[in-house]
């Protein structure tokens, strides 16, 4: 069982890296794809809504499917769909064909996002300690790898269809090779049996009926995810512009804002699991969101470029551990409905990430850009106040204390830990 858990964890790393690589390759080739399709920035901005809409639809569809057929079945299929879809935008010759390609790519991304997170929850449950943040860190590393590979192939003069086609083949092969290592149903059944024994076998008809309804806590987690991921979307699209337009920095210097934010996000996720095991998920979200609020306050108030760059760094470090804790908490609320619960949280969070840049853009018609950043600052403060939502859902295990911020948090849900 321990060997299978280790293998499943490595396979899950592969799927997260695959997802980051595929989406990163699309992002790197956006200018070339835009030119090939013969469209402008305004049209592209509208078509990106199809990417988001497809992702949201995929998330809502695949969550229940993962619960019914198992993540072991759904993850490889979703990964293969996502891998195959990445080549489609490179083949588009018009706005219509690009829109259809982005809809399919978004659908594949949404399916893979929820199914791999649902499987990550199962792996974390087997380990009995936090491992979710490391998966999200590997996703970021996959995106970094995409930027490096894309930069190199573009410098060689490779066309978008060739590079994206190669990416599709490599990613599809990786999806198939990693599939046998995913957790088998019998392993999950052992975990469920252990939990039922500890819980005194309290699994009656009323409990099963309750599972069919989405618990209010899931919607609370989804609302926090919307706010936190909105903040992340703001950083992705507005960090560079804020340093350049508000503080008058050069384009090269302004680019450091996003670099600082994304680097801090990745580094933070690499260490969050150990921090969460020591202080608990509630403290991670509370202190993380508070730290992010402090970083955004520095961005809003800073008259100097170095301070603003430091603010974006602190903002990324603070946000880094929040989303993994929210996904993990949603998945652990009910193992039999983990996929559906994760899809709710991920879906609303994704909508927040898409809406964030647009909301800030609308606010800039009324107030200066740095003043508009008061909104994500306020959302970080609200997320810090709502951190208790993650406490009762996360699994306890050896080395992970019950969260003092949530004394009602049950320790019965912890399976036997594996190294």
Image (cartoon, rainbow, N blue to C red):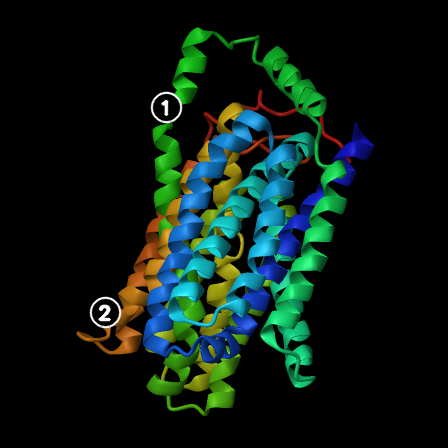
The Cα–Cα distance between marks 2 and 1, rounded to whole angstroms, is: 36 Å
Instruction: List the single residue furthest toward the left.
Output: 366
Residue shown at the point (68%, 30%) measured from the top left: 126
Residue 244 vertical position relative to residue 124 in the rendered view, above or below: below
Q: Residue tagged by mark 1?
A: 213
Residue at the (57%, 52%) spot, across then down: 82
Which structural element holds mark 2? helix
Q: Position of residue 94 (x, y in %)?
A: 42, 71
Query: Mark 2 and 1 residues: CB-CB less than 8 Å, in contact?
Result: no
Point out which mark residue 362 bears. Answer: 2
On the question of residue 52 being in view, the answer is yes
Camera-side residue of 143 and 376: 143
Q: Nearer the viewer, residue 21 or 144?
A: 21
| Residue 15 image offset from top left, x and y in percent | 65, 49
Q: Residue furthest right?
A: 3
Number of dots carrying numbers: 2
* Res. 141 in view: no
């Amino acid at each position: 069982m321990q060997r299978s858990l280790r293998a499943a964890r490595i396979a899950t790393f592969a799927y997260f890296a695959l997802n980051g690589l595929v989406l990163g390759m699309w992002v790197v080739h956006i200018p070339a794809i835009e030119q090939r399709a013969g469209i402008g920035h305004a049209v592209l901005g509208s078509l990106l809504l199809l990417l988001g809409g497809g992702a949201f639809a995929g998330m809502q569809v695949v969550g229940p499917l993962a619960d019914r057929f198992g993540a072991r079945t759904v993850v490889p299929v979703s990964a293969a769909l996502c891998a195959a879809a990445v080549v489609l935008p490179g083949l588009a010759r018009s706005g219509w064909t690009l829109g259809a390609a982005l809809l399919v790519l978004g659908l594949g991304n949404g399916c893979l996002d929820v199914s791999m997170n649902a499987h990550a929850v199962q792996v974390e449950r087997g380990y009995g300690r936090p491992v979710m943040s490391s998966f999200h860190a590997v996703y970021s590393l996959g995106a970094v790898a995409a930027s490096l590979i894309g930069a190199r192939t573009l410098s060689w003069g490779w066309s978008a269809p060739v590079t994206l086609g190669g990416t599709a083949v490599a990613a599809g092969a990786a999806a198939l090779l990693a599939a046998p290592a995913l957790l088998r149903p019998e392993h999950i059944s052992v975990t469920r049996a252990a939990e039922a024994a500890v819980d005194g076998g309290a699994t009656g008809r009323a409990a099963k009926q309750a599972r069919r309804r989405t618990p209010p806590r899931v919607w609370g987690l989804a609302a926090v995810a919307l706010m936190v991921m909105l903040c992340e979307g703001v950083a992705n699209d507005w960090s560079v512009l804020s340093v350049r337009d508000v503080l008058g920095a050069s384009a090269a210097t302004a680019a450091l804002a996003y670099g600082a934010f994304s680097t801090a996000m990745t580094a933070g996720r690499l260490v969050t699991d150990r921090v969460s095991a020591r202080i608990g998920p509630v403290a991670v979200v509370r202190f993380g969101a508070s730290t992010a609020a402090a970083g955004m306050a520095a961005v809003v108030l800073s008259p100097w470029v170095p301070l603003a760059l430091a603010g974006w760094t602190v903002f990324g470090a603070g946000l880094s551990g929040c989303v993994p804790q929210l996904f993990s908490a949603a998945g652990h609320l009910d193992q039999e409905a983990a996929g559906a619960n994760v899809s709710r949280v991920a879906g609303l969070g994704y909508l927040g990430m898409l809406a964030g840049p647009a909301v800030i853009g609308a606010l800039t018609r009324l107030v200066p850009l740095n003043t508009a950043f008061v909104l994500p600052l306020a959302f970080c403060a609200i997320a810090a106040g709502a951190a208790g939502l993650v406490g009762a859902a996360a699994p306890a295990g050896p080395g992970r204390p019950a969260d003092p911020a949530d004394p009602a948090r049950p320790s019965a849900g912890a399976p036997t830990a594996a190294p």
